[in-house]
Image (cartoon, grey):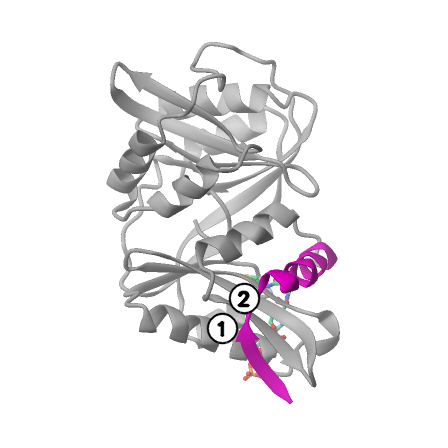
Amino acid sequence: VLHIRSMTRSDLLFGGELSRQAGWNQTAADWQRFLTLQPDGCFVAELDDQPIGTATTCLFEHVGWIGMVLVDPSARRQGVGRALMNQAIRYLESHAANAIRLDATPMGMPLYTSLGFTTQYRLTRFAGKIQCPHVKNKEEDSQEPPWEQIATFDANLIGYSRQKLFHQLEAEPEIRTLVDQKGQEMLGYVCTRPGRLAVYVGPCMASSPEVGEGLMRQALGRYHSQEVIIDVPNDNRRAIEVMASVGLKPSRELVRMCRGETAPEPIESLWASGDPAKG
Ligand SMILES: CC(C)(COP(=O)(O)OP(=O)(O)OC[C@H]1O[C@@H](n2cnc3c(N)ncnc32)[C@H](O)[C@@H]1OP(=O)(O)O)[C@@H](O)C(=O)NCCC(=O)NCCS
């Protein structure tokens, strides 16, 4: 019998096993963050009382995100993924989401398409060992990042507030953040965090291509000769060029999909997605 129930802290190890098995980059801290951000909106599928799948949601104002849709390989093609998705959609719609977004892998796309999700744009995951010398010319993270200003800057660009995400990042000592400011005016920010396989770079939003490139090179320079992963919109040409120039290679394609109202995203300002599970 298939049963979908709420995820609890005791499921986080199981989630970690599923994402590791899929070759994904999430750490225990990433899983903990999913549950902290939407404590009653993360789900586990059980087949005959055995956990076999997960899905998480994250609601920012009226925009809901779905992520971590994972089904154990032994239980695929039996409707588990669909049941998890239906539960996640129901949860978000009952909490007044008028748009639901996700980043689809090629494996997930047919399912999402059949549930009414349409393609917004494509992202490329870049991965590899960074070849980028360290440059120290912006605010280094000895200072506390101006989180309120970052949240306001971000909301002005994307059209909804991710303040609860920034509050959470502020509380995590492993998150490193760089900002570019002109006086009091915020011009851009980038966050990085450890991953299971590689440092994850993002979110990164910038008010101009010059600011984006400067922030990105400075952030990447800190990880010279280390493995990093970045998800970049294909239509941000400047960002794609920078990726190649620092030795990163395309490793896979993600498709940003939307169900409900589509909000236009400022792709030229979006240098790196924060997470496939919440944009
Ligand atoms: C994507 C994934 C979650 C789907 O889970 P699942 O339990 O196998 O999905 P379902 O059995 O509910 O299949 C849902 C529908 O998608 C379709 N589908 C699923 N996999 C498909 C495939 N590889 N090719 C074509 N169609 C497929 C089926 O037609 C099915 O429709 P049906 O209900 O009419 O049979 C699972 O394959 C998985 O965990 N993959 C690895 C992780 C991943 O990529 N997750 C997606 C993240 S965006």
Residue 235's quadrant in the figure? top left
Find residue 55 and name its label: 2
Residue at image point 31% right, 24% down: 187
How far from the left and from the top, in percent, is residue 245? Answer: 57, 23
- Left or right of 120, for residue 85: right
Q: How many marks?
A: 2
Name the residue carrying label 1. 85
Mark before the other along the chain sequence, 1 or 2: 2
Q: Which residues are magenta?
A: 1-21
Figure check: 202 above or below 216:
below
Outermost residue to the bottom: 1
Residue at image point 64% right, 64% down: 11
Q: Quadrant of ligand 1?
A: bottom right
Figure check: 232 above or below 187:
below
Distance CA(mark 1)–CA(mark 2): 7 Å
Determine whether the beta carbon of the residue marked 1 sits less than 8 angstroms from the nearest atom of ligand 1: yes
Say what secondary structure mark 1 lies in. Answer: helix
